[in-house]
Image: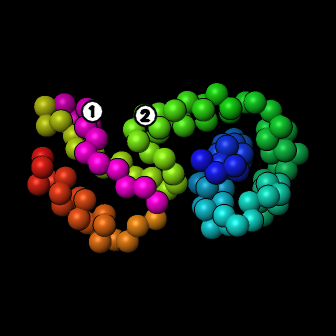
Amino acid sequence: MHPKAFDAAKAVRCAGDQGKFWEMHDRLFASQQALEPWNAHAEALALKVPEFEQCMKSDKHDEAIRADAKEAQKAGLTGTPSFLLTVTDPKDPKKVKGVTHIIGAQPFERFKAEIEKALTAK
């Protein structure tokens, strides 16, 4: 993880508290070279900035972020974006099996090849 990854995850969750999770997510991915100050992104999304700043200073989302990171590491996902390709169990569609993962921004052809390989292996 890069040094600002934890705070970026926190900013997204704090924005989510105000109903703007995906808006903050998309904004931070589009602004990776200018993540700070975090409240500038909150202002741009018309969040209640004092609430956002209070959330960022708190540990409200810390445990959940660490748990997510731990699960990602267990799955072999080491960067963002990361994609885990899975297949469902035909007997129980709630069960999935990880087939492979793709780390980082990759061209369409890479996804296509991995998906075709997963479908063939199924």
User: Can residue 63 be seen in this snapshot?
Assistant: yes
Pointer 2 local density, CA inside 10 Å: few below 14, some 14–19, many at least 20: few
Q: Image quarter for residue 39?
A: bottom right
Q: Mark 1: which secondary structure?
A: strand
**Residue 53 spot, x, y in % from top left:** 84, 44
Q: Position of residue 96 (x, y in %)?
A: 26, 36
Q: Main secondary structure of the magenta part?
A: strand
Residue 27 seen in the figure: no
Q: Amino acid at mark 2?
A: Lys
At horizontal 75% and vertical 30% (from top left) the residue drawn is 59
Q: Dividing the picture into quarters, in which one does residue 26 lie?
A: bottom right
Q: In terms of sequence position, does the residue under pointer 2 or pointer 1 come before the other?
A: 2
Which residue range is magenta in the image? 92-104
User: Would you say residue 100 sits in the magenta stretch?
Assistant: yes
The residue depicted at 66 percent of the width and 56 percent of the height is: 24
- Three-letter amino acid code of the residue under disc 1: Lys
Question: Which one is in front in this view, the residue at disc 2 or the one at disc 1?
Answer: 2
Q: Is residue 112 left or right of residue 101?
A: left
Which residue is labeled 2 in the image?
A: 74
Q: Please, which residue is most extreme toward the right here?
A: 50
Residue 86 in the image: above or below residue 25: above
User: In this image, 94 relative to 91: left or right?
Assistant: right
Q: Secondary structure at mark 2?
A: helix
Coordinates of residue 10 in the picture (x, y in percent): 69, 43
| Residue at 79% in and 38% down | 55
102 in the magenta segment: yes
Label tally: 2
Give the labeled residue for mark 1.
Answer: 94
Picture coordinates of residue 23, whole percent (x, y) = 63, 58
Mark 2–mark 1 distance (CA, rounded to whole Å): 20 Å
